[in-house]
Each structure stands twice: as C-alpha cells, then as structure tokens.
Amino acid sequence: MRVTDLPDVMQVERRGYAFPWSEGIFRDCLKAGYTMQVLRLDLVLVGYGVMQIAADEAHILNLCIDREYNHRGYARIMLERLLDLAQRAGAHMAFLEARPSVPRALHLYEQAGFNEIGLRPGYYESAKGREDAIVMAKTLPQLR
C-alpha cells in the first residue's frame, strides 16, 4: 500500500465498516512502516490488509475486502499473504481481534488455524454502544 492508494482504500473502508478507520490512521501506519498490502484486479482495489510486526509477533490490525467482491476467496488470499509476510519477517505468532457479530470472519480465521485465546470487553464501537473483541492467535511454522 502506498499513499496514492489511500483514496481507494478509504472508499472500501467506509463501505466495509460502520465505524471506519480515518485516513490519518492509515497514513500513520504507513509512516510507522507497518506491513500494508492491497489487492487489485486490474486497476480496481478489491481489498487490503494492515499488519504490525514486532520482535517475533505479528498483529493483523485490519483486513477488508470490498463488499462487491465478498464470497470469492479474496479475504483468504489476503490473510494468507499477510501470514506469509509475517513468517518471512521471522514472526512465530500471529494475533488479531475479531467481532463476534461477524461470523464469516471468525470462520475464515478458524479455517486458517487461528484459535480464540481471550476477550477484550468493549473493544469495538457499535451501533448499540460497544462490542467485545475475540482475541485469536496462530502459531506460525518457521521457515528454514
């Protein structure tokens, strides 16, 4: 992801979330050197992922696929790409938070080998106030 991708990223982010990240958050992640990937078909931005890698841990912060492209395997492709980059960077574990109200995402993460390890009460904004986050983790095989 580059700064020039942000207009397209923001369109997808706003369509995907009732409480989207601001453009400033994406800019801060770029400046901090987070791993940020976009998925395009021809020139159309289909989705993106944001991940922080520190020491031997990766934390997937945002993974979003445009609603028009849901149910086509692109979320799995993006997740696999992020996990591959985490492994190549030497991460031994990957973490993420997921909304209980999005069972499709939970299913994707479980299929990818993530397990629930905890709960963050009131982590997400929601239309009804706050929503808990399910904390998930996956051990990453080490590359030789």
Image (tube, rainbow, N blue to C red):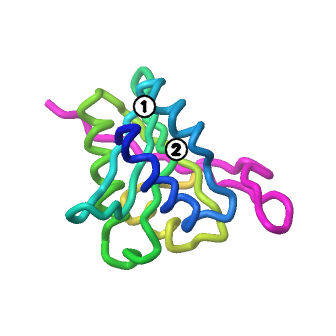
Q: Residue furthest left?
A: 144
* Amino acid type, residue under disc 2 in the picture: Leu
**Coordinates of residue 41 in the picture (x, y in percent):** 24, 65
Disc 2: which residue? 61
Q: In the image shown, does 109 or 81 lie closer to the viewer?
A: 81
Q: Which mark is residue 57?
A: none
Q: Main secondary structure of the magenta part?
A: strand
Magenta stretch in the rendered image: 117-144
Residue located beneath label 1 in the image: 34
- Res 19 → quadrant: bottom right
Q: Residue at x 29, y 27 (%)?
A: 90
Side of 94 relative to 135 (left or right):
left
Q: Position of residue 88 (x, y in %)?
A: 23, 33
Relative to 132, is 6 on the left or the right?
Answer: left
Q: Is 18 or 80 nearer to us in this picture? A: 18
Image coordinates for residue 49, horizontal then vertical, percent: 41, 49
Q: Give neighbour class at mark 2: few <14, some 14-19, many 20+ (Cα, 10 Å).
A: some
Indicate the position of residue 124 as horizontal and vertical percent values: 72, 53
Quarter in which the N terminus is drawn: top left
